[in-house]
Image: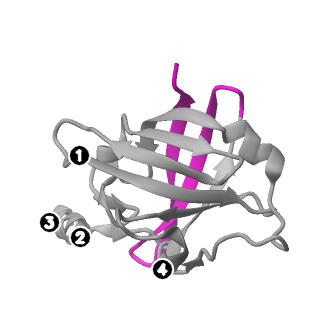
Amino acid sequence: MKKILFICMIAIMVFACKSASSTTASTEAPTLSTKLDKSTQVALKGNWVLTNVSYPGSDYIKVTSFDLADSKCFIGSTWNFISNNNKGTMTLTAPSCTAFTSPIVWSINNQGLLVLKIVNPGTKSKNVKEGYLLKVAGVTDNSFELIDNINVGGQTKDVTYQFQRAN
């Protein structure tokens, strides 16, 4: 029995998990008719540090966040959200990971989902047609969470990204 369990765990580790929301999110730029949650957008305005990434099975399963890097590479990353133009930046600086900086375009829709587009250098945000939908939770003056969904063995699991306001 232990051997079967071990083989199953190895199989799960071999097939790295990918965000379920990454390919299903249409992130057309907000238009005047799009209803946005402005009060939450204003609450997120500023500089943030991603302090923790958690999900069930994190000791055994590797999750690639935002189709960029291992989720653990995002710990310590800095994020800037500008609420009046829905732009910003994200910067990954984890020592054992490849450094990465990118502009982002974001908004929070009236369902409480953060609509996020990562914009490659030299690309206009209007030309980025895919992005990510993440649930916004626990918003305070100094912290908030983004929750993504992943598919693990046919089951949907939550990946929680915890943010703290940068000083």
Could you give the CA–CA distance between mark 1 and mark 2, rounded to whole angstroms? 33 Å
The amino acid at mark 1 is: Ala
Could you give the CA–CA distance between mark 3 and mark 2, rounded to whole angstroms? 9 Å
Q: Is residue 11 above or below residue 135?
A: below
Secondary structure mostly seen in the magenta stretch: strand
Residues packed near mark 1 inside 10 Å, few (<14), some (14 to 19) or many (20 plus): few
Circle 4 SS class: loop
The amino acid at mark 4 is: Thr
The amino acid at mark 2 is: Cys
Pick whichever, 79 or 134, lies toward us. 79
Q: In the rendered view, does 108 fall on the left or right side of 166?
A: right
Circle 3 SS class: helix
Disc 3 target residue? 3
Closer to the chain start, of discs 1 and 2, is 2
The amino acid at mark 3 is: Lys
Q: In the rendered view, does 11 fall on the left or right side of 154?
A: left
Q: Is residue 165 above or below residue 33?
A: above
Disc 1 target residue? 99
Mark 4, mark 3: which one is toward the viewer?
4
Q: Residue at x 67, y 58 (%)?
A: 107
Give the magenta range: 140-167
Could you give the CA–CA distance between mark 4 and mark 3, rounded to whole angstroms? 35 Å
The image quadrant where one finds the N terminus is bottom left
> Going by the picture, which residue comes out furthest to the top?
167
Disc 4 target residue? 23
Q: Is residue 68 above or below residue 127?
A: above
Could you give the CA–CA distance between mark 4 and mark 2, rounded to whole angstroms? 26 Å
Q: Is residue 38 above or below residue 63?
A: above
